[in-house]
Amino acid sequence: MNDRETGATLPDFQPRRRMSDLDHVYSQLSRSIMMGEFVPGQKLKLKELADVFHTSQMPVREALSRLVVSQVLEAAPRKSVTVPHVDAKRLEDLVSIRIDLECKALRQVASEPNQALANKLESINATMDKEAARKRPSIKNYLAVNHEFHFTIYEQSGNPDLTSIIEILWLRYGPLLNLLRNNGLNFAKHDHHEKIVRAVRVGNPELGVEGLTGDLMEAAVVIKNALEP
């Protein structure tokens, strides 16, 4: 089903596991938004989503309402919501906040050497390299593993409120990530990630901050170029 204004289609959502309809719809919508699968300006209609999820409109309405309250989506007329349009100011604001909060979480994690976590991050990074080396890498899989890399760190910060706020920022960043998906996603070697892994391994917060800041800014440059006429 296409959005008439943007020509965008709905992502392929995963089958429902053992959870309520509401939790399933919310988790799948959140995941797709976070992975940049929705186009800025795309309308999400209750009936279409309910048909895709094979549910009534009630859980879809509640899930969309949660995302509107979190300022991830915007309310629109005729029982629909809209993926926000994006501009350079939005990019600048979100990247600045993300760097502040994500580096704060990383500093807490990398304050002492953690070999086990470094090994886990190294393994996740290797999975990214393996996906990137494919003849036709899956953008969805690649970004999902990138998400796993980052949140494996943040969830070790010992601050669930900070992690929750970072997750909301990733959701708000989703429409910008859509531009990255369609304008030169870099599948090259992950030097910034490797620097973060080294920082966690030896307990060097500033090295980690350098790697994480470089990682976020590299993507932001590509998105900013895509935003320019």
Image (tube, rainbow, N blue to C red):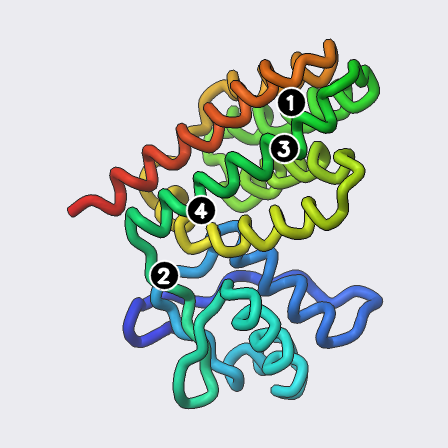
- CA distance separating discs 4 and 3: 15 Å
Position of residue 39 measured from the top left corner of the image (x, y, whole percent) = 38, 60
Badge 1: how crowded within 10 Å, few (<14), some, or many (20+)? some
Instruction: Check if mark 3's residue and mark 1's residue have beta carbons within 8 Å.
Output: no
Of the numbered discs in the image, which one, if any, rests on residue 126? 1
Which residue matches tag 3? 104
Based on the displayed image, in which of its 4 quarters is residue 40 positioned? bottom left
Badge 3: how crowded within 10 Å, few (<14), some, or many (20+)? some
Mark 4 / mark 1, whichever is N-terminal: 4
Mark 4 / mark 3, whichever is N-terminal: 4
Position of residue 184 measured from the top left corner of the image (x, y, whole percent) = 34, 36
Residue 148 makes an appearance in the image: yes
- Dot 3 falls on a residue whose secondary structure is helix
- CA distance separating discs 4 and 1: 28 Å
For the point 57% across and 31% down, the residue is 131
Q: Which one is nearer the viewer's eye here, 95 or 55?
A: 95
- CA distance separating discs 2 and 1: 31 Å
Give the residue furthest to the top. Answer: 202
For the point 52% across and 58% down, the residue is 33
What's the amino acid at mark 4?
Answer: Leu
- CA distance separating discs 4 and 2: 15 Å
Based on the displayed image, in which of its 4 quarters is residue 204 positioned? top right
Is label 4 or label 3 in front? 3
Which residue matches tag 4? 94
Q: As displayed, is residue 210 above or below residue 59?
A: above
- Taking the image as shown, residue 58 lies to the left or right of residue 138, namely right
Position of residue 149 measured from the top left corner of the image (x, y, whole percent) = 65, 33
Mark 2 / mark 1, whichever is N-terminal: 2
